[in-house]
Image (spheres, rainbow, N blue to C red):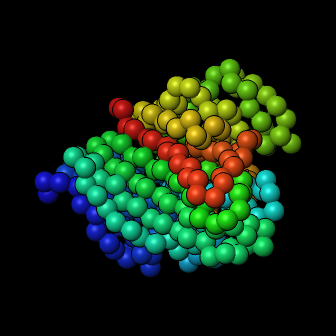
């Protein structure tokens, strides 16, 4: 293979696109939710996907990069994390540019889309793969005649190897809302490590975050148009209560989410918003 390739496939019953680079990097994206399910670099899987994930659309797929839109979590009247996680998106195309490739999906809302969100909207996901690097961009366009506001996130599940030494660096001293403790405000002391339940909303850090574990180092950055960063790990007790996670999975994952939560985005008719999160293997 001399240039990046995108091929369509059925994987465990899901219509997917498989992206492969000449370097061997490999990404799988499902049309269901326009959700990245796998990202392999140098033969190592960098994203967590639960072995118990539900793949038939009756629940959100637990792992990879779920797209939460147009509502983050339960901050509004819509179903938790919005309406598109369990929707079939339309596969559009893939374009090669140099040693990178970008694949695109689109989701158009029929009006009225939902009683609590009766607006015309087009959502798009662009997945760009280049050596050692994965970028996922979400965009939203107001295709209707009325203004609306939204929140959302790229709910990225990073794979962890070696839970005892894993650490997320770059948030030291940052303020956060502790959603695991009645949304109390708190200050990050040291790195984020695995152990207790972690459910924290920080302001987007100016520098890239670094996840260090037994697999090496991963750099995580997000555009300014994602002003919030969520770090989530259910911990042992909550993990064992989730039907689509195995008991020890909390030691195998950490969600680092690029999000817009505290200040919703206003989109007037014809306006478009877009923002990306980038993951890069650095060692
Ligand atoms: O189980 P879900 O709906 O995928 O949500 C998982 C978690 O997603 C995180 O983004 C939230 O901060 C958590 O509160 C939530 O529990």
Give me the residue at 70% from left, 75% from top.
112
- Percent from the top left, x then y, of residue 69? 64, 58
Give me the residue at 62% from left, 26% from top.
171
Give me the residue at 52% from left, 38% from top.
222
Q: Residue furthest left?
A: 2
The N terminus lies in quadrant: bottom left
Residue 2 visible in this rendered orientation of the protein: yes
- Find residue 6 and report its image quarter: bottom left
Q: On the rendered structure, is 44 left or right of 235?
A: left
Give me the residue at 46% from left, 50% from top.
136
- Find residue 280 and report its image quarter: top left
Residue 253 visible in this rendered orientation of the protein: no
Question: In the figure, 190 relative to 272: above or below?
Answer: above
User: Is 110 in front, or is 62?
Assistant: 110
Question: In the figure, 276 relative to 241: above or below?
Answer: above
User: Is 210 in front, or is 153?
Assistant: 153
Q: On the rendered structure, is 79 left or right of 210?
A: right
- Percent from the top left, x then y, of residue 18? 33, 64
Counting labels gives 0
- Percent from the top left, x then y, of residue 134? 39, 46
């Amino acid at each position: 293979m001399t240039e990046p390739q995108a091929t369509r496939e059925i994987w465990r019953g899901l219509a997917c696109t498989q992206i492969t680079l000449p370097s061997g990097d490999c990404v799988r994206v499902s049309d269901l939710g326009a959700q990245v399910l796998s990202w392999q670099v140098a033969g190592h899987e960098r994203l967590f996907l639960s072995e118990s994930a539900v793949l038939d659309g009756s629940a959100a797929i637990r792992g990879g990069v779920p797209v939460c839109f147009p509502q983050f979590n339960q901050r509004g009247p819509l179903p938790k994390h919005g309406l598109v996680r369990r929707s079939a998106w339309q596969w559009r195309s893939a374009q090669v540019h140099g040693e990178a490739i970008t694949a695109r999906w689109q989701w158009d809302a029929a009006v009225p889309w939902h009683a609590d969100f009766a607006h015309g909207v087009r959502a798009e996901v662009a997945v760009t793969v280049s050596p050692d690097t994965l970028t996922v961009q979400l965009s939203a366009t107001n295709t209707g005649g009325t203004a609306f506001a939204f929140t959302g996130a790229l709910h990225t599940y990073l794979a962890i190897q070696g839970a005892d030494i894993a650490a997320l660096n770059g948030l030291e001293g940052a303020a956060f809302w502790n959603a695991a403790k009645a949304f109390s405000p708190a200050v990050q002391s040291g790195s984020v490590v695995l152990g207790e339940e972690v459910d924290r909303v920080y302001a987007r850090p100016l520098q890239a975050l670094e996840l260090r574990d037994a697999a090496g180092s991963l750099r995580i950055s997000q555009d300014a148009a994602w002003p919030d960063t969520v770090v989530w790990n259910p911990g042992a007790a909550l993990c064992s209560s989730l039907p689509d996670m195995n008991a020890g999975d909390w030691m195998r994952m950490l969600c680092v989410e690029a999000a817009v939560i505290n200040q919703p985005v206003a989109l007037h008719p014809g306006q478009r918003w877009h923002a990306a999160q980038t993951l890069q293997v650095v060692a």
